[in-house]
Each structure stands twice: as structure tokens, then as C-alpha cells.
Amino acid sequence: MLTMLGEGFLVTLQIFFLTLIGSLPLGIVVALGRMSRFKPLALIVRFYISVMRGTPLMLQMFAIYFAPYYVFGIELTTDSKFNATIIAFIINYAAYFAEIYRSGIQSIPKGQYEAAEVLGYSRLQTFGKIVLPQVVKRILPAMGNEIITLVKDTSLAFAIGVAEMFSTAKALVASQVSMVPFVIAAVFYWVFNFVVEVVLNRVEKKLDYYHD
Amino acid sequence: MSDTNPIVRMAHVKKSFGEVEVLKDISLEVYPGEVVAVIGPSGGGKSTLLRCATLLETFDAGELSYGDLQVAHTEGGKAVYGAKDVIKQAKSRFGLVFQNYNLFPHYTVLKNIMDAPVSVQKRDKAEVERQARELIAKMGLEGNEGKVPCELSGGQQQRVSIARALCMNPEIVFFDEPTSALDPELTGEVLKVIKQLATEHMTMVVVTHEMQFARDVADRIVFMDGGVIVEEGPADQVINHPQHKRTQDFLARYENN
Ligand SMILES: Nc1ncnc2c1ncn2[C@@H]1O[C@H](COP(=O)(O)OP(=O)(O)O)[C@@H](O)[C@H]1O
Ligand SMILES: [Mg+2]
């Protein structure tokens, strides 16, 4: 039983990390698009964020899963379930992260940009060296909340039939007529989040060397 | 002095924010080694003038050049700015010290000073570090190299920001009320380093409300009010024998408190 749950947990971990790897950078790009002075782009991105935040992630997952078949007539395979899950999670979380990045970016005082401009930093350097590092520190608590939600959201992949930990636990509960798999799964999630919080606290401590 | 070329030359600069004309035909030239103090009541356009000179604002009409480098000229009554590379070159010729320092809070003192010379000017890191450490010593900041700005007093932060500007090897440094954000007991240490720079013939334009400092350190004083240069001349003359009523009134207000 533990082996099966362990295997499910590995899939959960994959969803978690692939989502972060994709959505953390994508969120920055989305945030910049949202703040773009080119109005049509800003508007499109705003619409995208609104749809992502305003509709259920589960629905988005299914939409992305079935789209290749209904739109392009491509046969669906077992892989496409997992892929659809990852894509849906990435673009959904990127929208949430983008709004957090945006609030962080907008909280950086104008004087920082002006100092960088007078010193001749390029726009990319200003963003990468001066703005972003300060933004990361400011948004860490809000990001932490989202990341902890993500740990729990990974169980949504159950609906589409990806064999992550919750699906495995549910199957075991049914076959063994026992609540124990649920309890073990709950412990897994809880420990996972505990570790996430420890890591976040570490990062927060590390960035604690200055305040502004 | 007029046989040499000015470091910076602004001519007939006009700048409006919406309907409000903030700079009304301002002309100012600063020559090598000169220290110019800009004084005047709040809202007179002093900061805007510095911001136009340092390209943080674009003006509507007028000319701006740094030495042989023409940054902006007027065509058909409108200011036309030079190409990107001209702007970039110009930016390496001046420095600006802000009222509230605007240090990078996540960088140490040393990195605040070194980063732009290394990553913007692409200079050799060891050479920049040597210069940065010299500047730190000169600013009386030894022992603070590894500290971050929030660990320093306002006066120390402002001295770091002066060092940051100087490490770019500018031909001229602009100061916008460098001591106005400081507690009175800390202004002296900042004015002292600016004074020191003046004795070394660093070319500087200093917007200030410190009249005594202006008189003692500046070669020339410019009095600005309502977007125009009302009066300018040798420091001693403007402070002790102001010609215009507005200058007299302004200075009288300072003497009274
Ligand atoms: N970004 C801006 N937008 C609109 N008005 C501005 C802006 N910056 C300055 N002003 C106005 O321009 C005038 C001159 O301001 P400023 O140059 O800061 O004067 P000073 O530095 O002499 O106090 C003031 O009336 C101020 O309100
Ligand atoms: Mg001002």
C-alpha cells in the first residue's frame, strides 16, 4: 500500500515542481505584459488573467485535455492527461503569480528606477538586478500562500485520471474498504507542506539581511 | 573661463507639465571646475531643471549639450533628442545625487558603488574596486563596505550615494538638495565632503537651501523662482548684494530663521 501511495506521491511531486518551474518565470512575463504600455497587449493579458482566475482549474484542465481532439482531431493518449494537467496548472498559476509579481513591481519606489537610469543601466539590467530581487523579497509571503495552495491543488489531477497521490489513495480506499490510505495520504500532504514552509522560511531568513 | 567649453550647456529650455510651464526659457552653462549653487523657493523648478539636465525628464524646447555631445536641440520650436548612443554617452558624463539617496537597498555599500562601473561601463572589476575603496575612505566610510544601506545613518547613506556617482568618473555631478532629508546634525558631514570635492575642482551643480554653504563653496549662485533664473552671479554678490527684489525677499526670509 505504501509503495503505491509512494508512487502516487512521486506524480504529485512532478505536478508540483513542473508547475513551479513553468509558472514562476511565466508569471513574470505575464505581469510585464499586463503592465505593458502597449494597450492591446495589456488588455489581452488582462483578459487571460481574468479567465484563469475566474473559472475552475478543473474545467481548464479538461478544456486543455480535450482541445487537441476537438479542435485538431488529434488522438488522445494516456500521456496527454498528464501533459494537459501540467499545462493547465502552469498557465493557471502563472496568472495568480503574475498578479502577485505586479503588486510587487508596482511597490518598488520610482527613485530606484531613476537611480538606475542615471547610472546608465539598461531596462533589462534595471529589472533583473535592481527591481526583481527587491520584488522577490516583498512578495515572498504572498507567493508562499499560493505555493501551499498548489500542494493541495495537485489533487485536482485526480478528476482527469492522473494517478497522483489522491487518486491512488481513493483507489486503495475502495479496494481495501479502509480509511487508512486517506489518513496516510493526508499525512503525506501535510508533511509536504511542512517542508515547503520550512524552505520558504529559510528563503525569507536569507533575504532578511536588509529591509527597506 | 569663457575661452574654454562648458561641461554642460542648456539654452532656452522650456518645460511644461500639462498646462503649467515649470521652466520658462532657462539657459545655464557650467564650466570645468566650477561649483554652481542653485537656490530659490520650493516649486521654483530647481529639481525639474536638474531632471532635465540628467535626462530623467525631457523638455519641450531648448538645447542641451555635454561638451561636444549635443543631446538635444530645437527644430521648429520643439526639442529633438539625439540617438540612443548619444544619450548613452551623455549619461556617462554626469552623475546625480538625490535628496533621498536612492541607494539600492539589497546591495552592500561596496556593491552599490561598484555595480554600475562594472556592469554598465564594463570596466575591470579589480580596478573599480580599488577606486571604490578609495572613495569609501575619502567619504569617511571605512568599515562599512559590507553593510547594507539600512544599517547606515542618513548622512552615511548620502555619502555612499555621492561615492556611487563619483565612481562613474563623471565630468559633472548634480546634487538635488543633498541634505534636505537629513537631521540637522548630519548635514555637516555631507556638506563637508561636497566642500572637499569643490577644493579638488570637481564640477558641480548643487541645489541647496544651505545659504552659508552656498556662499562659502559655490563660485556662482543661481536664484530660481517661478521657472526663471531671476538672478545669477558670483556667490558673494548674490548673497550679500542681491539686485532683484525677489532675491532680496527670499534671502531675508532665510536670515530671519
Ligand atoms: N512630474 C510632475 N508632474 C506635474 N507637475 C510637476 C511634476 N514635477 C514637478 N511639478 C511641478 O513643477 C513645479 C516645479 O517643481 P520642482 O522642479 O520640483 O521645484 P523645486 O525643486 O524648485 O521645488 C512645481 O509646481 C511642481 O508642482
Ligand atoms: Mg526640488
Image (cartoon, coloured by chain):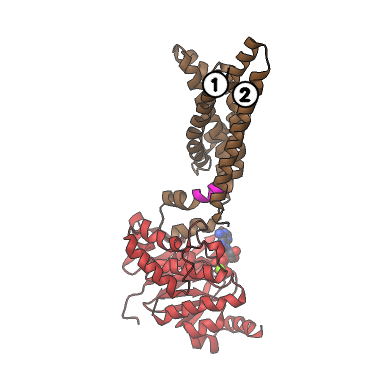
Chain colours: A brown, B red
Q: Is residue A10 magenta?
A: no
**Residue under label 1:** A8
Q: Secondary structure at mark 1?
A: helix
Q: Quadrant of residue B3?
A: bottom left
Residue type of the residue flagged with mark 2: Ala
Determine whether A209 is above or below B217 in the image: above
What's the CA distance linking mark 2 and mark 1?
9 Å
**What residue is shown at x 61% (from left), y 32% (from top)?**
A191
Q: Which residues are magenta?
A: A132-137
Q: Residues within 10 Å of mark 1 (few under 14, many from 20)?
A: many
Ligand 1 image position (quadrant): bottom right
Q: Quadrant of residue B182?
A: bottom right
- Number of numbered labels in the structure image: 2
Mark 1, chain letter? A
Q: What is the number of the mark on residue A185?
A: 2
Residue type of the residue flagged with mark 1: Gly
Left or right of A157? Residue B161 is left
Determine whether A81 is above or below B80 in the image: above
**What residue is shown at x 42% (from left), y 65% (from top)?**
B62
**What residue is shown at x 31% (from left), y 60% (from top)?**
B124
**Where is the C terminus of chain A found, in terms of image quarters?**
bottom right
Mark 2, chain letter? A
A108, B215: nearer the viewer: A108
Residue B57 can be seen, yes or no: no
Q: Residue A103 at x, y = what percent? A: 59, 45
User: Is label 2 on the same chain as label 1?
Assistant: yes
Q: Secondary structure at mark 2?
A: helix
A184, B119: nearer the viewer: A184
Callout 2 touching callout 1 (CB < 8 Å): yes
Q: Residues within 10 Å of mark 2 (few under 14, many from 20)?
A: many
**What residue is shown at x 53% (from left), y 43% (from top)?**
A35
Q: Residue A174 at x, y = what percent? A: 64, 11
